[in-house]
Amino acid sequence: MSAVRTTRTVLAAALVAGLTATALATPALAAPAPAKTDHAATQQALQAAVDAGVPGVVAGARDGHDRWTGTAGERGGDDRFRVGSITKTFAATVLLQLQAEGRLDLDDRVEKHLPGVVRGNGHDGRKITVRQLLNHTSGIYSYTEDPDFQERVFGPGFLEHRYDTWSPRQLVGVAMAHQPEFDPGDGWKYSNTNYVLAGMVIEKITGRPYGKAVENRIIKPLKLRATSVPGTRVTMPQPSSRAYSTLSPTPGAPVHDVTELNPSLALAAGEMISDSDDLQTFYRALLKGRLLPKAGMRELTTTVAVDPGFPQFRYGLGISWQKLSCGTEIWGHGGGIHGSVSEAYTTRDGRHSLAANFNADWTGDTQSVVEAEFCGTAPKDAESKGLDAKALTGLVPRN
């Protein structure tokens, strides 16, 4: 979950064919099957990450009916991993569903649902809408940028505090100690506080933790068996691999096993766990309109500019749009949390999708994997082709 700055910080319809007597009498020539996607470039990009020092990488891709899984290093193809800010798309989808049910309006002021929560040092929930939380135009300071929080949670202090439990009010309180980045609606700045608040709005409306809404509205209907909202559970479900971090921007810093942590430090901004197959199922279903009505889809995919220098990258409601070096347009999100950096994207028609994960957060180029899968080659300067996707991966600042 992090900012545009240097930080490290995304079910097939049944086919019913009717044969007429004429068709039986005069068989038509079968249309040629579409060529299967060549995933060689993607596999090369995975291996390049391992060569760069990532202990293990895994990726899954689908193109129509073609399915592919690739690994490099010490990794299993069905590994589960912490998805970081990909959680944001799940939370935004729930809020859009609640709007479709008439239980809120995205243009409601945050104050209406969370009275008195967004106050202090110029922050004012009476002037901020729920929509502005979801597309990061609220101006609210991101709690993950607080220096003390970074030292305690992302620096060496993590080893002492990795099992600490954080409440939503505590995380928002960290943000309220700082001034806003800008007036609501006057800019764009990625803020994890926005989605902690989004989770709180879901809880206020449904009367249950936001994770229960995600489970009941998305995980269960889509049968996402590897996907979970862990709450305060510190261990990873199996199968999974270890996660590693240097907990420091210093080159050559020692590597630590950071697999176990209390994900309450992220909540609706980045706590979820999944695997490459489930993430593809989710994004494909979402972009095909299976989770939202047409009006909700229009809102989801209405984007705002994130940086004038990167017109090939825009942000919707908990989902980003990218135009890759080859011209292909994709939708999804990146996600990063201690020792885990992920990407999950699909084309707008939901046909071609990718989900990948690195189990290290200090090296490796996830954007090259994205370029390789959707463009067939990973340019050496993949990160310069658009806003580095790792800028939206989430919690862990990439220095």
Image: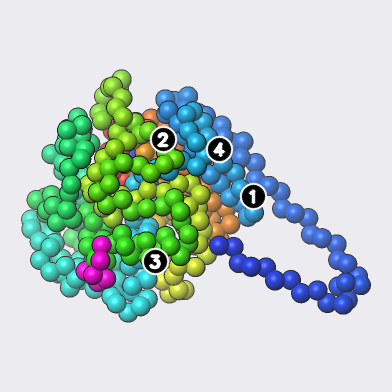
Q: Amino acid at mark 1?
A: Asp
Q: Which residue is mark 3?
A: 217
Q: Taking 137 as reference, is 312 left or right?
A: right
**What kind of element bears circle 4?**
strand
Tell me which amino acid carries mark 2.
Ser
At horizontal 24% and vertical 49% (from top left) the residue drawn is 232
The image quadrant that residue 259 belongs to is: top left
Magenta range: 204-209
Asked whether 162 or 328 is in front, the reply is 162
Q: Is residue 47 above or below residue 202?
A: above
Q: If you read the primary sequence from the N terminus, does the residue marked by circle 4 or circle 2 appear first?
A: 4
Residue that badge 1 annotates:
66
Q: Is residue 386 visible from the viewing direction of this image? A: no
The answer to the question of whether label 4 and label 2 lie on touching residues, with beta carbons closer than 8 A, is: no
Q: Callout 3: helix, strand or loop? A: helix
Residue 20 placement (x, y as % from top left): 83, 77
Q: Which residue is mark 4?
A: 70
